[in-house]
Image: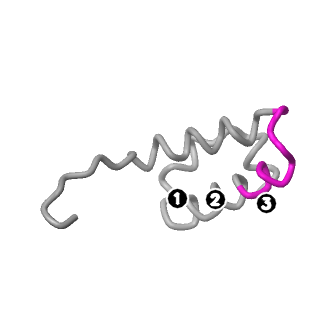
Amino acid sequence: MLGVTLPVAKLEDVLEGKIWAVLDPARRASKRQKDLVDISRILEKYSHLRPAVPEEILARLL
């Protein structure tokens, strides 16, 4: 950006963080719902990442 190199998280790392967030029982329910939506959006665009998502989360998405 404007000649400055910025590090960017890999999509797989973002997905992993979202999975951790959804599975964290200490996280607020409203935040976990947002993370579920984010996972759903990622999988809509990048379906090849579906095997990285635990079945218990996939069941909540469908």
SS class, disc 2: helix
Residue 33 lies within the magenta run: yes
Q: Which sits earlier in the primary sequence, circle 1 or circle 3?
A: 1
Mark 1 highlights which residue? 47
The region drawn magenta spans 25-34
Label 3 CA crowd tier, 10 Å (few <14, some 14–19, many 20+): few
- Placement of 48 over or under 51, stated as above or below: below
Q: Which sits earlier in the primary sequence, circle 2 or circle 3?
A: 2
Mark 3 highlights which residue? 62
Disc 2 to disc 3: CB gap under 8 Å: no
Residue 38 disc label: 2
- Placement of 52 over or under 36, stated as above or below: above
Q: Nearer the viewer, residue 18 or 1?
A: 1
Q: In x, y percent, where is residue 4?
A: 17, 56
Residue 39 is left or right of residue 56, and the answer is left
**Residue occupying the far left of the picture:** 3
Residue 43 lies within the magenta run: no
Label 2 CA crowd tier, 10 Å (few <14, some 14–19, many 20+): some
Residue 15 disc label: none
Q: Nearer the viewer, residue 44 or 5?
A: 5
